[in-house]
Image: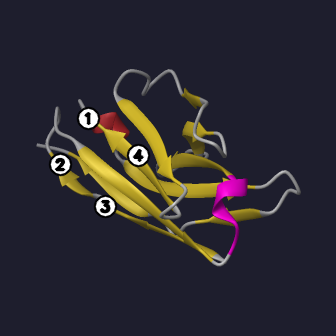
């Protein structure tokens, strides 16, 4: 199985981006999904999480109210809608999927750069 991240790019402060995570080769609907962000010199941090059903979400305090995580299990897709972007949101964003049996998949990452 694998995850493929996409949708990153260069955006001005205050702008928006939508990241996508495409899953294949495993039962995606049985997996929780999270988006992580990594910047140089810092540990990878979780910014958003969604339950396997999509009914429960939670966010890091730094992105709450600006980012929205969602999923479509019929398409094996997860998304991260990012708005009111700030320069400190710059980083490599990774999708991660976890099962109850502790199987883990990571996407390859997609770069988000917020700069004027």
Please tell me whether residue 32 is drawn above or below residue 29 in the rendered image.
above
Residue 82 spot, x, y in % from top left? 32, 39
Q: Which residue is mark 1?
A: 85
41 or 84: nearer the viewer? 84
The reply to whether dot 4 and dot 1 touch (C-beta < 8 Å) is no
* Numbered badge on residue 11: 2
- Of tags 4 and 1, the one toward the viewer is 4
Residue, x 31% and y 59% (percent of image)?
Answer: 8
Please tell me whether residue 94 is drawn above or below residue 67 in the rendered image.
below
Total marks drawn? 4
The local crowd at label 1, few if under 14, some if 14 to 19, many if 20 or more residues have their Cα within 10 Å, is many
What's the magenta region? 26-31
Q: CA distance from mark 2 to mark 3?
A: 11 Å
Q: CA distance from mark 4 to mark 3?
A: 9 Å
- Of tags 2 and 3, the one toward the viewer is 3
Q: Which residue is mark 3?
A: 7
Q: Which residue is mark 4?
A: 80
- Of tags 1 and 3, the one toward the viewer is 3
Q: Quadrant of residue 30?
A: bottom right
Q: Is residue 73 left or right of residue 93?
A: right
Residue, x 40% and y 63% (percent of image)?
Answer: 110
The local crowd at label 2, few if under 14, some if 14 to 19, many if 20 or more residues have their Cα within 10 Å, is some
Residue 57 spot, x, y in % from top left? 57, 31
Residue 70 spot, x, y in % from top left? 46, 43
């Amino acid at each position: 199985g694998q995850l493929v991240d996409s949708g990153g790019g260069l955006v001005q402060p205050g702008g928006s981006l939508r990241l996508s995570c495409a899953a294949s080769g495993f039962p995606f609907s049985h997996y929780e999904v999270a988006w992580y962000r990594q910047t140089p010199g810092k540990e990878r941090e979780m910014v958003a999480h969604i339950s396997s059903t999509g009914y429960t979400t939670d966010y890091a305090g730094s992105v709450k109210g600006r980012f929205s995580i969602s999923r479509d299990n019929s398409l094996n897709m997860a998304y991260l809608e990012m708005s009111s972007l700030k320069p400190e949101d710059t980083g490599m964003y990774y999708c991660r999927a976890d099962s109850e049996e502790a199987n883990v998949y990571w996407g390859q990452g997609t770069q988000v750069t917020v700069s004027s």
